[in-house]
Image (cartoon, rainbow, N blue to C red):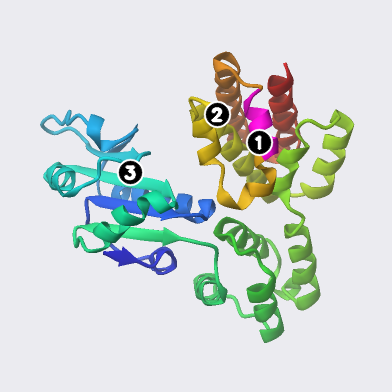
Amino acid sequence: MKLDPIKFLVNKNFEIDKKIYFISGNEITLIEKIKLKIIKSFQKREKVIVLRIDSIDNFADEEELFQNKKIYLVKNYKYIDKKSLSIIKEKNCIFVFVQENSQKIKKVKNELIKDKDVILFDCYELDQNSKITILNEFLKLNSLVIDQSVYWLLVEKLDNKYGLFENTLSKILELDQNDINFNNIKKLITINEAGKEKIFFYLLKRNSKIVEIYREKIVTISDVNDFFYYCKFFCKIIIESNNENEYNKKIPIYLFKEKKYLIGIYRRYNWEKKKLLLNLILSTEKILRKENSLSLIFGLRFFLNIKKITVS
């Protein structure tokens, strides 16, 4: 069974009751948002443990009486067939498959759509209708009234990636109602279009250049959070890839122009550097949660430390 990811997100009362979810597409921020909402939906109802496995062929049922329910995040779509699905449907567990689109998974998706016990989400960049749906729900939820000129400016100019679209809307809440006008929103959008994710591609530049571009594009706490998310994503695919071929497949399709650069970064990493990178991400995440007012400083320090590990 296939569900519209946007309708799923904006419907706060949507109850999910299936055991198997398959999230695919090429829009990473939307994929992550869907995955997070599925997990939170179950966490609201009962205690659950979130675990990660490579594929369902090495799934081991370790349930014990009165133990918390498990949500398995499955990295690999392989070994999905009618037999394996029937087996995991009998378990008291939830399975969430996350897979970027490719020709290889087309056959699997076609089979899953027919299964009433499976929910399939296809996550792509937002079109105009999706933006209108999200924006209408945002305005309703926050009891905001805006001019038609502002409304259509947001629909037309905001980013097609869900995460960036949502983050810009959240910045509007930081404005007073009287300040939500065409000129102020236009300025806000201009800042948002600066391309914070592109800072990662300055990683091998001189420190002075990194500081310059960081100060130009990262000006608010929300900017730091966006920037940290992008850096974390790029770092995670380095850490989780066992070899260059595997890493190459994990690079999102829309970054085809930057693929050569990213592969060059990966070639600088060995197991020890990956461990250092993981520890850096975890420690920075804790700091940003505790020291929100100092996040601008820590965001820059985080990126310079990534460079230090990379070039060492």
Could you say whether the residue bearing mark 1 is in a helix, strand or loop?
Answer: helix
79 with respect to 183 (left or right): left
Location of residue 48 in the rendering, given as x and y in whole percent from the top left corner: 27, 40
Gap in angstroms between the C-alphas marked 3 and 2: 20 Å
Residue shown at 55%/60% (left/top)? 162
Amino acid marked by disc 2: Glu
| Residue 37 visible within the image | no
Is residue 143 within the magenta segment? no
Q: Quarter-wise, where is residue 144 in the image? A: bottom right
Residue shown at 75%/64% (left/top)? 188
Q: Quarter-wise, where is residue 238 in the image? A: top right
Which of marks 2 and 3 precedes in the sequence? 3
Gap in angstroms between the C-alphas marked 2 and 1: 10 Å
Location of residue 64 in the rendering, given as x and y in whole percent from the top left corner: 13, 29
Residues at marks 2 and 1 touching, judged by CB atoms closer than 8 Å: no
Residue position marked by numbered label 3 in the rendering: 77
Q: Which residues are magenta?
A: 260-267
Query: Which residue is at the front of the view, 116 or 18?
Result: 116
Query: Which residue is at the front of the view, 2 or 229?
Result: 2
Is residue 266 within the magenta segment? yes
- Mark number, residue 172: none
Residue position marked by numbered label 2 in the rendering: 244
- Mark number, residue 262: 1
Mark 3, Cα crowd under 10 Å, few <14 / some 14-19 / many 20+, is some
Amino acid marked by disc 3: Tyr
Residue shown at 67%/65% (left/top)? 172
